[in-house]
Image (spheres, grey):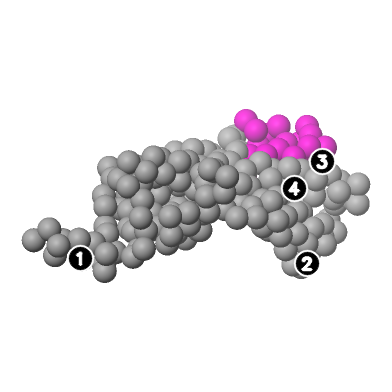
Amino acid sequence: MKKLLTFLLLTLSIQLFSANYKVVLKKGVTLSQQEITKNNSEIEIAAKRDYDSIKRAVSVGMKSMISRMMDEQIQLPAISQKNSLKFQKKMNELYNDMFDYIMNKNKIDVEKIRYVTNDIVEVTLNIKTPDFTTNLQKYSELMNSNFLNEKEMKNLDNFSEDEIFDKIITKMFSSMKQSFQRTDKYASMKTTIYLEKDNGKWGIAELDEKLKNFREIYKSVN
């Protein structure tokens, strides 16, 4: 029986289960249970850390692209050029703030760690992000019920064109942020990353170069 069990362990992938995620060992992995347990803890931290770095690099690139697109496409002939530039700047600031807020609301969970070798693992992550459909519905409800109250509407005559645009846009983004603050609905998607153990530390190989590429790739998108 002992020989049979040994044979099965050598010829099949071994599936282990932690409290939160599954661990799979490919044939040829020779780590002890103690080493696996220690590695798993380090891998979980490293996977979340490095994926968060990638997420932020993508965020920088995306915000740069959005800003460029807004500068090129937003045309407001009804207002002066000076106020139009202020409007664009305000929109950029609010979009960036909103983008950061939504990114920070994301949740990352490790779903599976698969040992390819003793020093290379494939990590399956479950990424949870606020459900846009649900939150846009909440946003629409907020806008319909509380866009500008009666007193604010009456006071619009006392404000300049620039101030009116500022108030309206600020109100729009404030309502959007409120809808995400109240969210309890998340959409999930899975992604896979590879980590390597180098000099005793787990991480995505050549991460700095990958982060640079993520930031740069959006510069060519129009």
Distance from disc 1 to disc 3, alpha carbons, whole Å, reads 74 Å
Q: Provide the residue designation for mark 3.
A: 162
- The residue under label 3 is which amino acid type? Asp
Q: Secondary structure at mark 2?
A: helix
What type of secondary structure mainly makes up the magenta span?
helix
Distance from disc 3 to disc 2, alpha carbons, whole Å, reads 33 Å
In percent of width and height, residue 76 lies at: 82, 57
Q: Secondary structure at mark 1?
A: helix
Q: Quadrant of the N terminus?
A: bottom left
Q: Secondary structure at mark 4?
A: helix
In percent of width and height, residue 113 lies at: 38, 54
Which one is closest to the eye, mark 2 or mark 1?
Answer: 1
Q: Earlier in the sequence, mark 4 or mark 2?
A: 4
Name the one closer to the observer, 19 or 98: 19
Q: Earlier in the sequence, mark 3 or mark 2?
A: 3
- The residue under label 2 is which amino acid type? Ser
User: Horizontally, is 142 left or right of 27 in the view?
Assistant: right
Q: Disc 4 vs disc 2: Cβ atoms closer than 8 Å?
A: no
Q: Earlier in the sequence, mark 3 or mark 4?
A: 4
- The residue under label 4 is which amino acid type? Asn
Name the one closer to the observer, 128 or 67: 128
Distance from disc 4 to disc 1, alpha carbons, whole Å, reads 59 Å
Q: Provide the residue designation for mark 1.
A: 8
Distance from disc 4 to disc 2, alpha carbons, whole Å, reads 19 Å
- The residue under label 1 is which amino acid type? Leu
Q: Residue at x 71, y 60 (%)?
A: 213
Q: Which mark is residue 92?
A: 4
Q: Residue at x 61, y 51 (%)?
A: 54
Q: Provide the residue designation for mark 2.
A: 220
Q: Which residues are magenta?
A: 151-173
Which one is closest to the eye, mark 1 or mark 3?
Answer: 1
Q: How many marks?
A: 4
